């Protein structure tokens, strides 16, 4: 496994991040524990979750599964850079969601309890809160850092200008501010190249792409279809209908290179500016082991240019829409 620094910090993390959203609803606890053990064996030290994951069973279920795994000992917690998130509603009563100072305090305490740990390494805001001022958010985060309950703060699904506002507000308080941004980013969805990636580069944030295989569309969906393998839900079927020609060209190119389509998609992300680690969210152990292969895939300039031909990207703003 290769390692890199998370943004401008001194924190070293694996080039793949283990996403845990499937743990609980789609992956039983015993299987989830095995996946996390094998992730460590493969050198993956960076795990991502959220307080709302597992909602199909009950809110917080995924954090509980991770907490039970940590409780087994053997250095599991010490070897893990643990990231979780807050924002989504955890109940029906006011102040059980979003980013008020009150909810930040309550949410972190609840996550710590479910995770069975005394601190969270990377505490991420799952979405922008347009109603809460940055002065309130940063004051609450500063308290948690001072208490040792969190170490770093990250964002998820922020626009470029949200990152700029957050960082300027943090700078005025002499606070480190954001160190990472989780964004929806893959060969098929490259909108973040307009302003989010440039903002992340400028402010020293590590980018953590989620859905790197675009819900499976970049994982060999047409080949699976020919082999009679179920290709996903209605959303995947609709997206495939609109992108079939591109996907076919992509799978043909992957075959030409001698790699699995999913490996190419992950390897491509690892070449992108500011990207620290794509988040892979396996349901099974086989899916995890398949993802690990991508770290060893090297794409030369000609291959990168061909991928840009198949899936055109964006120039950074304002050149993307002006001069």
Image (spheres, helix red, strand yellow):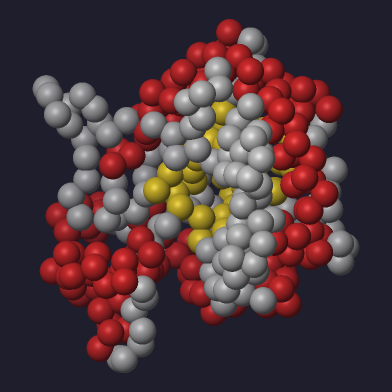
Question: Which residue occupies the extreme bottom position in the image?
Answer: 228
Within the image, what quadrant is residue 256 found in?
A: bottom left
- Rendered location of residue 54, percent (x, y): 62, 62
Q: Quadrant of the image for the C terminus? A: top left
- Rendered location of residue 230, percent (x, y): 36, 84
Q: Compare residues 186 and 98 and report the one nearer the observer.
A: 98
> Number of marks in the image?
0
- Rendered location of residue 116, percent (x, y): 84, 53
Q: Quadrant of the image for the N terminus? A: bottom right
Q: Which residue is drawn at 17% across and 27% down?
A: 319
Q: Which residue is drawn at 37% across and 45% down?
A: 272
Question: Which residue occupies the extreme top position in the image?
Answer: 172
Q: Can residue 234 be seen in this view?
A: yes
Question: Which residue occupies the extreme front position in the image?
Answer: 93
Q: Compare residues 131 and 144 and report the one nearer the observer.
A: 131
Within the image, what quadrant is residue 58 found in?
A: bottom right
In the picture, measured across the screen, residue 87 lies left or right of residue 149, that is left
């Amino acid at each position: 496994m290769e390692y890199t620094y998370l943004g401008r910090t001194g924190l070293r993390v694996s080039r793949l991040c283990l996403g845990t959203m499937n743990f609980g609803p789609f992956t039983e606890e015993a299987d989830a524990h095995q996946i996390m053990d094998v992730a460590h064996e493969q050198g993956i030290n960076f795990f991502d979750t959220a307080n709302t994951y597992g909602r199909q069973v009950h809110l917080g279920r995924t954090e509980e599964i991770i907490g039970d795994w940590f409780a087994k000992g053997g250095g599991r917690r010490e070897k893990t850079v643990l990231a979780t998130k807050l924002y989504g509603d955890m109940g029906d009563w006011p102040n059980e969601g979003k980013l008020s100072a009150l909810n930040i305090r309550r949410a972190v305490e609840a996550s710590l309890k479910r995770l069975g740990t005394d601190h969270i390494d990377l505490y991420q805001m799952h979405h922008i809160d347009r109603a809460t001022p940055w002065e309130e958010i940063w004051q609450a985060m500063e308290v948690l850092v001072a208490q040792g309950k969190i170490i770093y703060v990250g964002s998820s699904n922020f626009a470029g200008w949200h990152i700029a506002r957050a960082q300027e507000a943090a700078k005025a308080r002499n606070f480190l501010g954001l160190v990472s941004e989780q964004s929806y980013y893959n060969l098929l969805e490259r909108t973040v190249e307009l302003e989010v990636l440039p903002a992340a580069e400028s402010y020293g944030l590590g980018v953590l792409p989620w859905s790197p295989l675009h819900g499976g569309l970049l994982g060999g969906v047409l080949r699976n279809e020919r082999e009679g393998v179920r290709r996903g839900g209605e959303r995947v079927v609709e997206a495939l209908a609109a992108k079939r020609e591109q996907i076919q060209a992509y799978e043909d190119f992957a075959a030409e290179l001698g790699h699995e389509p999913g490996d190419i998609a992950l390897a491509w992300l690892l070449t992108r500016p500011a990207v620290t680690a794509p988040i892979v969210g396996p349901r099974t152990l086989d899916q995890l082991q398949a993802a690990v292969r991508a770290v060893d895939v090297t794409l030369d300039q000609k291959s990168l240019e061909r991928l840009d031909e198949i899936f055109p990207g964006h120039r950074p703003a304002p050149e993307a829409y002006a001069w």
